[in-house]
Image (tube, rainbow, N blue to C red):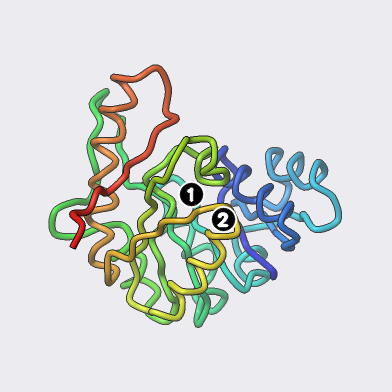
Amino acid sequence: MKIGMLGTGPVGRNLATKLVQLGHEVKMGSRTADNKDATAWAQANGAKASRGTFADAAAFGEIIFNVTNGQHSLEALKSAGEKNLNGKILVDVANPLDFSTGELKLTVSNTDSLGEQVQRAFPKAKVVKALNTVNTDIQVNPSLLPGDHDLFISGDDKAAKAKVTELLKSFGWKSIIDLGGIKSARGQEALLLMFMSLSNAMPNEYFNYKVVRKKR
């Protein structure tokens, strides 16, 4: 499968590397075609790895991953080009986090979410919110943690969610909870406040959530 990765940070590089290892072709996109991080990643990951602009990556991919800074995701996606996103699955991994005041806050919450904003801005894309609630190493290797633990997914298009779920299972995820439509991305993004609190209280970010259900 051809996959476009929008963003060159640690999350994007980790996801892109995993996808190449699984046999997919991945083009990493950034604001400029000669981005140093994207170039170094492509050179290190062989023939199935390439790099270009946001628009290049979006045009290339059958599935697109948004791993840009959540505060700038809409700008980056506009640079990718609406026509390059139309009809495609757009996996939104970004979180609308703001550290500018020294205190963590969400730039959008309660009555909206970044996932919903992306879907409204690109109505012909099939936006699926996923992978935004765990550390990047766990994203690509859930077996780093013992036992069963859960990943969440949100989106309006059931077929798109099924396709993303299949891809995530190839990463090793076994328990993926479908929260419903893209509106439920509000819960996923709000969970980042708890994630950061736990991160500050623990030795590292290698943890996840497990939903414990009452037996019928």
Question: Does 177 appear above or below 201?
Answer: below
Q: Please give the name of the residue rendered at 39% of the width and 45% of the height, measured from the top-left corner.
A: 149
Q: Which mark, residue 51?
A: none
Q: Please give the name of the residue rendered at 53% of the width and 35% of the height, measured from the top-left corner.
A: 144
User: Alpha-carbon distance for marks 1 and 2?
Assistant: 6 Å
Type of amino acid at the residue the image marks with label 2: Leu
| Residue 159 locus on image (x, y percent) | 45, 81
Quarter in which the C terminus is drawn:
bottom left
Mark 1 closeness class: few <14, some 14–19, many ≥20 residues within 10 Å: many
Mark 2 closeness class: few <14, some 14–19, many ≥20 residues within 10 Å: many
Residue with the mark numbered 1 = 68
In terms of secondary structure, where does tag 2 sit?
strand
**Badges 1 and 2: C-beta atoms under 8 Å apart?**
yes
Q: Nearer the viewer, residue 121 or 20?
A: 20
Which residue extends farthest front? 216
Type of amino acid at the residue the image marks with label 1: Thr
In terms of secondary structure, where does tag 1 sit?
loop
Question: Does 210 appear above or below 5?
Answer: above
Residue 80 lies in quadrant? bottom right
Residue with the mark numbered 2 = 6
Q: Taking 117 as reference, is 147 left or right?
A: right
Q: Taking 54 as reference, is 146 left or right?
A: left
Question: Does 31 appear above or below 201?
Answer: below
